Amino acid sequence: MADSVLIAPLFDEAVAAVQSAVLQEHRLHFENDTNASLLLDELRRVSVSNGSVDQRVVVCSRKLTLFIRTLAPYFDLLSTCIKLQPEWISWFWGALRLVIKMSSAYLLLLEKVADMLEAIAHAIPPYQQIYEACSANTPDSNVRDEDCHLAALMSYVYADFVQLFLELYCIFCRGSQAHTMSWRPLDSRISRMEVRLAKQRRWLEKETQNDIQNYSDISHHRKHYLDFLQNQDQSRGGDYLDHDGQRAVKRWRRVEKMRTWLCNSPATSQVDRQPRQYSPDSCAWFLQSSVYCKWRDQPFEKAVANDADYLLNSWQHRVLFVQAQIGFGKTFISHSVIENLTAEAEDPNICDEPPVIAHYRFSLLHSKHNHPDDALRALSHQLLQLHRNDHSTLDAVCLLLRKTSFREHANTDEVLDVLTLLLRQHPTYIAIDGIDECSNTEVFLGLLARLCRGSDARVILFSRPDLKIPLEYQKWASDAPHIFSLKSPHNAMAIENYLTPELNRLADQGFFGISMDRTLIPQFAQAANGEFLWASMLLKLLQSPLISPEERLSLLLNVQSLKGLGSLYHTMIDALARHSHKKKRVITSTFHWLSHGIHHLDSAALQAALSTQSTDENDTSHTMDILNALEELSCGLLLVTNDAVSFTHASVRDFLQSSASHTSEFSLYNESGVHGHLAADCLSYLVYSVPKQPLGVLHPHNPPTPPAASASSGASQRTNSSGDSGYKSLSSSDGDNNHAVAPIVLNPRNSSSRPTGIRTIPFDTHLPFLRYAALCWPIHLSRALTLSSHHSITSSTTDTLAYLPALSAFLCSRLAVTSWVEASFRYSLPPTLTRLVGPLSDLKGEVSPSTAKGRELRCVVGQMRILSERLAGLKREHEGVMRRNPSLIWQMDEPGEDAYWPVWEDVVASASVP
């Protein structure tokens, strides 16, 4: 017969594959009598739990139950053609049971596995119906010779499912591989399997469709099915090699999609700025310390990584806390640790697979990315990139990206599941700097403990000594938690080796004149008291052009007076006071924006904010390249990296906000005054930098329900509908079109209400600070007024009322006010000033009306009250149409002398009159 060429059934071969692939640590999950009934009973117990189990787990158990019940009759059908061996059943269902158990540790992955198996269940042939048909057609229970060939054909499905279970199993453990050389992603293999199931279904239906069969037809169908299976197996390798590059690109796209899902923020490129000072040898003492070497040199063992019980009971010993005072140089040490771990990763004594290093830095200077969730997302983002070519990781990515329910961005639990799985798959070091600067240290350490319980990752944490370590990091009868406390003697020699050559270099260049005794240089390092930050800031001060060689030498000879960061910072800001007024204003404004901005400004917006001039709008040349000059201008108190500006260290901002700096013009101690200055900068930008004209093309008002009367052509006219709505129609007269004072294109009345261009340029493309200035100046002013109650108006009038000139100029410029209102509506935030009128009025009692500032304040209060009422009316009567078409603010129809909003047609017309 044609099917006599069949090889032996694949059952024993598949069982052998399970036995060789399953690690010894997981053999305990296999039982000799494992069968479908046992699995269904276990899943049933989950389904009937009275609220003690997550509802998502219950849903997964029901999907898995469907799969098992659909597949279980396969063995009944198989028993009609061959005698079943117990190990065939037990190892088959045992492999599935192992997959369910291991995926249960990651709820997100369990859901995906259940979804996938549920989808496969719908492609499985109706084995129960086929079995019943076969039982009715073959009452003779004796196995005939040709039934062995039938069993061999049936064994392909058995082998396919075993291979699938092993591939899923390999996702959840380290070191076991079930893949062949001709590997392709999991979703592709699932599609292939569904095709094979569909083919088997058609073959079985033909095999059992009639009570009386023609054996030649049966042989033909079997041969056709066998040829399909063998051709598919033979084609596994050839076509894959031909498209290797294309397949690699597709895999990386999947990985990139997963990375975006896990971490849709640019935080990963901002949290880890490489320090530029110090010699690499400065941290050699730490890298050679016994505490660090003991933590680093623990081998990554496959048996340990796959032993969940051992991981759970020993995780505290894989975490090392490194603690030191502020300014010690912990961040630089953390960078040295990363470099050292990268270099040591290739050591074969550590692990067969080279471990990778993931890292994150919390910083008070980048508080936007200081949430515990940010660190988890960044770590998973890095690991996915590092393992983008690994088969197990790619299978996990494919499993997660299957066509099932998938939220836009991962929540914390989902990120934690993915990260734990990646740490379980691969040996990994994790370095976290600034853990004490996290927005919620307790939550982060709790999440980190969950990661460590589920993996063998080695974690090193850098913090200050006051970090509160949760009790769960302690382990009875052991030395956990492991804390490496760093003191000043640890890096005293490193600081001396850093300072001495730098001071000698400055002396060689004449920074200290010609009378310096160089034998004193080694003694200067002792004043650092273990603070690398102090040493680096001292060098920046000594290199500043603001002080003379004699002053530099005097500072060194009296270096004991500079001990401590506070004393050093005080000397530095005293030196800054020698700058010109313009430079001091730029430095002060930068301090303000970095410390009290509502949100972080990008470089273009900060440049615009620093360039704003309240007295001369054309005098901005000195700030053209101000960002790059900030580091030198500030004596190193500011750091500029890739056009991003920040304080050199959080302690700089802390000092400026403390009472120790309150006498300096650079102080941030008076928070009310700082917000007043920021409000003034925003208002000045609106008055002097934003064009006093419509921000975009004017569009006429198109009512939602136009009147039935037909529109007439000709000169501009005011219709009933436009009059009722309070807006003025645009004129199409030649006069207005021929005498424009600004580059504004006026649309004819009968034109469409929106531009028809393919590409529309955003209205604020050349106004990078407009969004912030328009939306945030009321917030800054409100905070200035609210906080002013904590400061004396008479003692700090200049700071507290710093916003008054800019606010007065803004309120007196009706065009600037109108541009601001238009911008606010374009940004979908209708303006309101109701809460500012009362606090401003209260200030009148504290400032004498006989002074110029008192008179200006009373004028501002009156103008503010009028504008507030106008804005309230605008919002009450026209908010809907203004949201749809913000340019209508320039087309208001207000008859009489009570008109407030300027009509752009009239502005253009009046400007054209000689």
Image: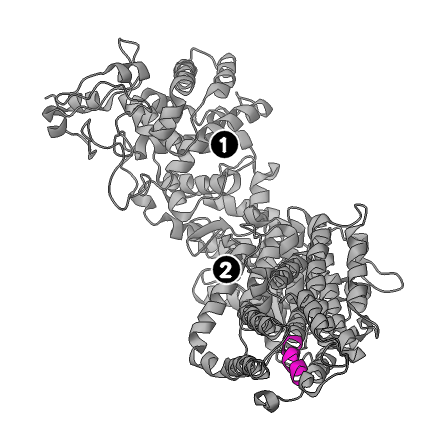
Whether tag 1 and tag 2 are in contact, CB under 8 A, the answer is no
The amino acid marked with disc number 2 is: Lys
Q: How is the image coloured?
A: one colour
**Which label was assigned to residue 257?**
2
On the question of residue 764 being in view, the answer is yes
In the rendered structure, does residue 154 fall within the stretch colored magenta? yes
Q: Residue at x 64, y 65 (%)?
A: 126
Quadrant of residue 339 within the rendered picture: bottom right
For the N terminus, give its image quadrant: bottom right
**Which label was assigned to residue 675?**
1
Q: Residue at x 56, y 65 (%)?
A: 398
| 634 vs 259: above or below | above
Quadrant of residue 298 within the rendered picture: bottom right
- How far is the residue under mark 1 from the one under mark 2? 41 Å
Name the residue nearer the viewer: 449 or 502. Answer: 449
Residue furthest to the front: 212
Looking at the rendering, the stretch of residues picked out in magenta corresponds to 149-158
Q: Which badge, 1 or 2, is on the more N-terminal residue?
A: 2
| 292 vs 691: above or below | below
